[in-house]
Image: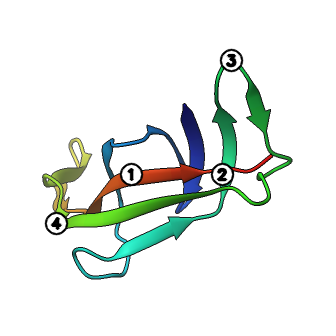
Amino acid sequence: MYAVFDSCGKQYKIIQGQTIKLEKIIGKIGDKIEFKNILMIYDKNQFNIGKPIIPGAKIIAQIILHGKNKKIKIIKFRRRKHYRKTKGHRQLFTSIKILKIKYSI
């Protein structure tokens, strides 16, 4: 059984017990969170696709870690114009573990 859900404008395909990185979610380490924007669930050779979401379905997950990704370098450069600008960015993330996918027909 797997599911596809939407969080912060991005879609993630998950299975039960999987650990994934999401955009920063407010909460403490060890807190349980629920996602209700389930777009699709596949279970026992049967697809259930929402229009746009599946009512009554939810994913329960636990926050494992908060952190920052690797630094991304942004470089702006104009040749022959004496213009060069460098900037960096580290995106915040939250690592979660999927505990349960709840779905009732």
Q: How far apart are the alpha carbons under marks 4 and 1?
A: 18 Å
Q: How far apart are the alpha carbons under marks 2 and 4?
A: 25 Å
Q: Position of residue 61 (x, y in %)?
A: 40, 61
Q: Which residue is mark 2?
A: 38
Q: Position of residue 71 (x, y in %)?
A: 13, 55
Q: Position of residue 63 (x, y in %)?
A: 29, 67
Say the numbered circle drawn on residue 98.
1
Q: Earlier in the sequence, mark 3 or mark 4?
A: 3
Say the numbered circle drawn on residue 45.
3
- Other residues around mark 3 within 10 Å, as few (<14) / some (14–19) / many (≥20): few
Pick the residue in front: 85 or 58: 58
Rendered image coloring scheme? rainbow
Q: Earlier in the sequence, mark 3 or mark 1?
A: 3
The amino acid pointed to by label 3 is Asn
The amino acid pointed to by label 2 is Ile
Q: Secondary structure at mark 3?
A: loop
Pick the residue in front: 80 or 54: 54
Q: Earlier in the sequence, mark 4 or mark 1?
A: 4
- Closest to the camera, between mark 4 and mark 1, is 1
Image point (69%, 55%), residue name? 57
Mark 3 and mark 2 in contact (Cβ < 8 Å)?
no
Q: How far apart are the alpha carbons under marks 3 and 1?
A: 21 Å
Mark 4 and mark 3 in contact (Cβ < 8 Å)?
no
- Closest to the camera, between mark 2 and mark 1, is 1
Q: How far apart are the alpha carbons under marks 2 and 3?
A: 18 Å
Residue 34 vertical placement versus 17 (above, below): below
Q: In the picture, residue 18 is in which quadrant? A: top left
- Other residues around mark 1 within 10 Å, as few (<14) / some (14–19) / many (≥20): many
- Closest to the camera, between mark 2 and mark 4, is 2
On screen, residue 14 versus residue 38, left or right, reads left
Q: Secondary structure at mark 4?
A: strand
- Other residues around mark 4 within 10 Å, as few (<14) / some (14–19) / many (≥20): few
